[in-house]
């Protein structure tokens, strides 16, 4: 199935005409890959998809949801979270109140990951947690806080081992109190986050491409991992500008391992061990 450049142009124009969304500045390669998967899933041609997008609002919304990336896990990339705890959360202990934003939060696993770390650092009570995503179904999953246990447990085990580098399981190393944060039903492969965590975040549906900061607060920490790598250079700069304008002085931005700050923000955001701090 060959998706031509002209098909991408027609697809984008259809989205602009029949929905409030604009995917013009998403990377072509990523967009092609997602369109190809949609066509395979529904067993339709490009012409049939474009026709249904124009005449079936339910199908149009389904296409938009499938264009967004929802792959995430609790403590995904465990060493990154250990570094965050050591380098960033210790600095936040100096503050009386903390504001955190998870743009592109997907199904919420990273929102819960951070809340667990904040609680372990004694910071959760003074933190306000905000999270947003373009995908309304993903936000519903985040609010429910129920995930596959077997998919997430390798990261949890890895993170716990990072806290005990000797690997000896010494009694002097406190086992991580996972049961304080979620309950597990192994027979159903289910992991359910505890209510005090589920009730903490404020979620909003938000399009990073078009919307302003819908929470109307500035942030001390923004965690946006594996989102901007799907944007082209123009859109990345636009999103970074949104982040920058809504960060407090000294605030930190955490990106994914494959993501870099645009050169135009050099000097305004200072990189330290792949975290980016606002200095002006």
Image (cartoon, rainbow, N blue to C red):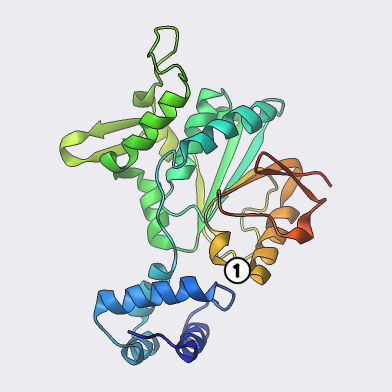
Position of 90 relative to 197 (above/below)? above
Residue 166: x percent and y percent?
Answer: 45, 16
Foreground residue among 232 and 101: 232
Asked whether residue 34 appears in the rendered view, the answer is yes
Residue 69: x percent and y percent?
Answer: 43, 61
Position of 263 relative to 79 (above/below)? below
Horizontally, is 73 left or right of 48 in the view?
Answer: right
Outermost residue on the top side: it is 172
Horizontally, is 54 left or right of 240 in the view?
Answer: left
**Residue 207's quadrant in the figure?**
bottom right
Horizontally, is 86 left or right of 277 in the view?
Answer: left
Residue 243: x percent and y percent?
Answer: 68, 55
Outermost residue on the left side: it is 187
Residue 128: x percent and y percent?
Answer: 59, 39
Asked whether residue 58 appears in the rendered view, the answer is no
Q: What residue sits 20% from the left and 34% below the top?
A: 186
Position of 128 relative to 108 (above/below)? above
**Residue 65's quadrant in the figure?**
bottom left
Total numbered badges shown on the rendered structure: 1
Position of 112 relative to 244 (above/below)? above
Q: What residue sits 37% from the left and 14% below the top?
A: 169
SS for dot 1: loop
Tell me the quadrant of the picture where the N terminus can be found. bottom left
Q: What residue sits 61% from the left and 58% below the top?
A: 214
The residue at which mark 1 appears reads as 209
Foreground residue among 194 and 256: 256
Q: What residue sits 42% from the left and 24% below the top?
A: 161
Horizontally, is 23 left or right of 222 in the view?
Answer: left
Residue density around tag 1, few if under 14, some if 14–19, many if 20 or more, within 10 Å = some
Foreground residue among 104 and 263: 263
């Amino acid at each position: 199935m060959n998706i031509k450049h002209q098909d991408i142009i027609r697809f984008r124009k259809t989205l602009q005409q029949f929905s409030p969304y604009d995917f013009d500045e998403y990377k072509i390669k990523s967009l092609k890959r997602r369109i190809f998967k949609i066509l395979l899933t529904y067993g339709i041609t490009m012409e049939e998809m474009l026709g249904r997008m124009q005449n079936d609002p339910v199908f149009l919304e389904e296409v938009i949801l499938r264009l967004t990336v929802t792959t995430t896990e609790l403590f995904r990339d465990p060493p990154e979270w250990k570094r965050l705890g050591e380098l960033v959360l210790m600095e936040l202990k100096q503050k009386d109140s903390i504001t955190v934003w998870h743009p592109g939060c997907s199904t919420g696993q990273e929102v819960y990951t951070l809340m667990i770390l904040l609680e372990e650092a004694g910071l959760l009570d003074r933190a306000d947690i905000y999270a947003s995503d373009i995908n309304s179904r993903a936000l519903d999953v985040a609010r429910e806080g129920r995930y596959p246990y077997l998919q997430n447990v390798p990261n949890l085990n890895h993170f716990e081992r990072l806290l005990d580098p000797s690997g000896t399981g010494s009694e002097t190393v406190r086992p991580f109190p996972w049961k304080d944060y979620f309950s597990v039903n192994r027979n159903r492969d289910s992991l359910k986050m505890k209510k005090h965590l589920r009730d903490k975040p404020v979620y909003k549906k938000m399009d990073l491409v078009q919307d302003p900061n819908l929470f109307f607060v500035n942030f001390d920490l923004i965690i946006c991992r594996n989102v901007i790598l799907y944007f082209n250079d123009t859109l990345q700069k636009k999103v970074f500008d949104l982040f920058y304008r809504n960060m407090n002085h000294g605030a930190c931005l955490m990106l994914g391992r494959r993501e870099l700050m645009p050169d135009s923000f050099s000097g305004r955001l200072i990189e330290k061990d792949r975290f980016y701090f606002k200095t002006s």
